[in-house]
Image (cartoon, rainbow, N blue to C red):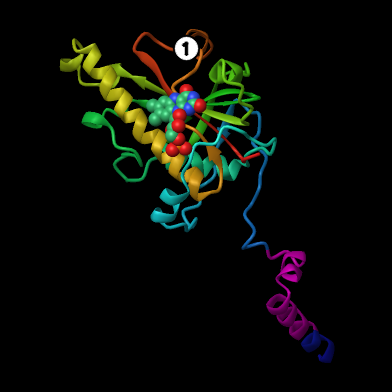
Amino acid sequence: MKRLLFNVFASVFCALAFPACAHAAGNNADVPAETEIPADETIQLKEPDKTLSVSLMQALSDRKSQREFSEKPLSLETLSSLLWAANGVNRSDGRRTAPSAVNSQDIDIYVCMASGAYLYDAKQHRLVRVTTEDVRKQVADRQPMAAPVFLVLVGDVSRYPGGMSSQRQVLESLAAMDAGYVSQNICLYCSAAKLATVPRASMDKAALAKSLQLKESQILLLNNPVGYAK
Ligand SMILES: Cc1cc2nc3c(=O)[nH]c(=O)nc-3n(C[C@H](O)[C@H](O)[C@H](O)COP(=O)(O)O)c2cc1C
């Protein structure tokens, strides 16, 4: 009995006085999980961490373009939160964190990593591989940039109502505006999560359209390399 009381007292004291002891005892509640991103055909993403608490004004104060990245990879948890913030489903009717003209939901995010390029399926909050090719050099194009992940924003004008189909130029400009919102969501999430990014219009569009097997109605608009600052 005495030993039991001592053990209980010791654990409580240890957890209060030395938080590291609590970790050693298996209580990792305050340590963010860091799972490696698997190189699977389909990757089920984790629930976004909505407890990340940086004020909007602080995220805006810290936002800046960064073009040099360390080799540190993104964890599956971070990638999951990043994609949800970018353009995930935030309401029961399927609408998203980014607005879209006439609710067309015309922006797709292709996640380009060493293991290939994946399409973000926001509804299922998962990634579906479109190619095993590492297309990051095609996204970086002539600007050397070694980020672990590039998010490529592609607009699909076929998602607009049929009556608008004759106005290709108008639809392309609406898609470009919609991509801007998604890119800004990425920038603000990165600022809040202390990640580095830069919105970019440059990329080798001809090569990428081929590698990502894009349709005639799909347009490459912007990309955001994402990683940790060097
Ligand atoms: C539509 C758009 C396209 C951009 N394209 C590129 C690009 O291709 N390469 C690049 O290094 N930066 C690009 N930028 C980033 C700008 O150069 C950057 O935002 C600007 O220098 C201001 O710096 P700041 O973002 O740190 O405020 C782009 C920004 C926007 C909004």
Question: Would you say the beta carbon of the disc 1 residue lies within 8 angstroms of ligand 1?
Answer: no
Instruction: Report whether residue 121 is seen.
Output: no
Q: Residues within 10 Å of mark 1 (few under 14, many from 20)?
A: some
- Res 188 → quadrant: top left
Q: Residue at x 50, y 17 (%)?
A: 203
Image coords of residue 8 (percent x, y): 75, 83
Identify the magenta region: 7-27
Marks counted in the figure total 1
The chief SS type of the magenta part is: helix
In the visual, does 208 lie left or right of 99?
right
Q: Residue furthest left?
A: 163
Secondary structure under tag 1 reads helix
Residue farthest toward the right in the current orientation of the protein: 3
Quadrant holding the C terminus: top right
Query: In this orientation, which residue lies closer to the viewer: 150 or 48?
Result: 150
Q: What percent of the width, then of the height, locates residue 227?
A: 60, 37
**Residue extending furthest toward the bottom:** 2
Please give left or right for residue 93 compared with residue 196 in the image: left
Q: What x and y, as percent, mark residue 190?
A: 50, 43
Q: In which of the image's four quarters is ligand 1 placed? A: top left
Amino acid at the residue labelled 1: Lys
Q: Residue at x 49, y 50 (%)?
A: 192
The residue where tag 1 is placed is 205
Is 22 magenta? The answer is: yes
Whether residue 192 is in magenta: the answer is no
Q: Is residue 118 above or below residue 183?
A: above
Residue 156 in the figure: left or right of residue 132? left
Residue 113 to residue 71: above or below: above
